[in-house]
Amino acid sequence: MPALARPHRKETLELPPRRAIVAADTDVLVVGGGPAGLGAALGAADAGADVILAERYGFFGGNATASLVMPFMSYFTETPRPQRAGTKYLLPTDHGPGEPVIAGVLQRFVTRLIDEGGAMVPNLDTGYTVPFDPELFKHVALEMADDAGVHFLLHAFASGVVGDGRVEGVVFETKSGPLVVRARTVIDCTGDGDMAAQAGAPYEVGDNDGMVQPMTLLFRMAEFERTAFQAYARAHPDEWRGVHGLWSLVRSATATGELTLPREDILFFATPRERELAVNSTRVTRSVPVLGTDVWDLSYAEWESRRQMRQISAFLRRYVPGFEKAYLDQSGAGVGVRETRRFLGDYQLTEADVLSARKFDDVIARCSYPIDMHNPKGKGTVLKRLPPGEAYDIPLRALVPQKVEGLLVAGRCISGTHEAHSSYRIMPAAMATGQAAGVCAALAALRRRTPREIPVGDVQVELLRQGADLRGINP
Ligand SMILES: Cc1cc2nc3c(=O)[nH]c(=O)nc-3n(C[C@H](O)[C@H](O)[C@H](O)COP(=O)(O)OP(=O)(O)OC[C@H]3O[C@@H](n4cnc5c(N)ncnc54)[C@H](O)[C@@H]3O)c2cc1C
């Protein structure tokens, strides 16, 4: 355990009241520029609203860029097929061809990334994921937001809300001092629901014991020899399941003490670069919750995941063919956070909804990704797939937090159970719920209504106009 500055004193101190500059008034304020925030800003701007997109870092993308989560997970329906060993792409895949279930902003974003040479076309060999280059992601995100007329506020950490019961604006900590942006509608796309929590919206965290899916620091290895690695993968078919593998090598290195990891395998993702690989194998677990909303837990997670990263990169170089000359060229700017607050909305999505591919009249987005639970308590990852060819609906009610007006949530903090969250948390679904929240927020702002007062049919009509896939409904 590192010598962290965990507080040993518990008293509080009253701070003097302070003033903030009211920097802007806008129709829609989107807080957080990750996949959900980008979807929200582009959806709201396309619906005719004046939009500000605020982000704590100096670039957009959220986990996609700051934490090097480099493939969009599949947004295609699945069809079962025999596993193939060592595909052209990299590793075995058991994910067959299907239909895309998300379009709209995501489709435009992916197309632009591919056109810029920054992403691979999803296909059988990529397991229908979209591996991308995070630097080009940043570039495309900025350009698309700019083209849409979205105003940016970067290097702005949102620390509080203005308004009581109805959110009327957000306070930002900046180099210019505290700023307030007033908005007719605010969309919380912080992943953690920081604004919704500040506004007093009720939420849940984790499983029945409050344990959440573990944080992971991702990193990239450069100068990796793909051909040698694929030859090894083909010669050892028992060593692979999907993109997970190297069990026996991990076991041996664990026995010698070279690896001390809370997982039993290595999880890899190819990138659009021939001689590069993204490694998703650190895992921060403890006997008590490690939360991405607790600054002491975050400090611990950074320390522990960096310790594991050093072990894993050394292990790969020493034991795994293809990595002999590889080196660790980048880690995330911060540890990747999978799960924190899940807000209680007017509807809460459940595991049964996901696995039965449930349909809702107020559908605003769809998702086909499995329940994908990295064990919050230690080793193992559970995957539970939807029926072949199926997708489930995400209802607008899951984006409307209880007990607060003037606010929507989108992305990974929408209303769902711990299990359902493990499916809809993927970036394509986050972008789709973001776009829907953006449309609803724009309609609310332009009509001087709250999001809860906007008929879902109007949101669906505008989403369809923007090219969203709502499984052919006719509102
Ligand atoms: C290790 C790991 C691996 C994953 N693997 C995949 C994968 O392979 N494919 C996939 O599709 N998904 C994957 N996911 C899930 C996915 O990355 C997230 O669930 C998704 O990014 C959620 O999108 P979001 O926009 O809701 O949140 P985020 O991506 O977290 O974006 C939130 C944004 O808000 C900003 N922000 C936060 N708080 C504040 C604040 N107070 N003020 C201002 N700005 C703020 C952040 O800086 C960030 O830009 C993975 C997640 C992790 C952690």
Image (cartoon, rainbow, N blue to C red):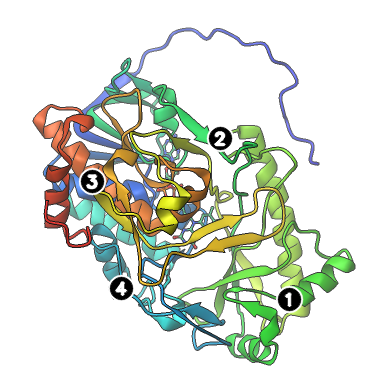
Report the amino acid beneath label 4.
Glu
In percent of width and height, residue 218 lies at 59, 59
Report the amino acid beneath label 1.
Arg
Discs 2, 1 touching: Cβ within 8 Å: no
Indicate which disc, 1 or 4, sits on the residue closer to the N terminus: 4
Residue of label 4: 99
Could one spot residue 82 in this view of the protein? yes
State the mark number for residue 317. Answer: 1
Residue of label 3: 362
Report helix, strand or loop for mark 4: loop
Could one spot residue 426 in this view of the protein? no
Report the amino acid beneath label 3.
Asp
Tell me which residue sits at (69%, 60%) in the image: 309
Left/right of residue 389 with respect to residue 360 in the rendered view: right
Q: Residues within 10 Å of mark 1 (few under 14, many from 20)?
A: some
State the mark number for residue 293. Answer: 2
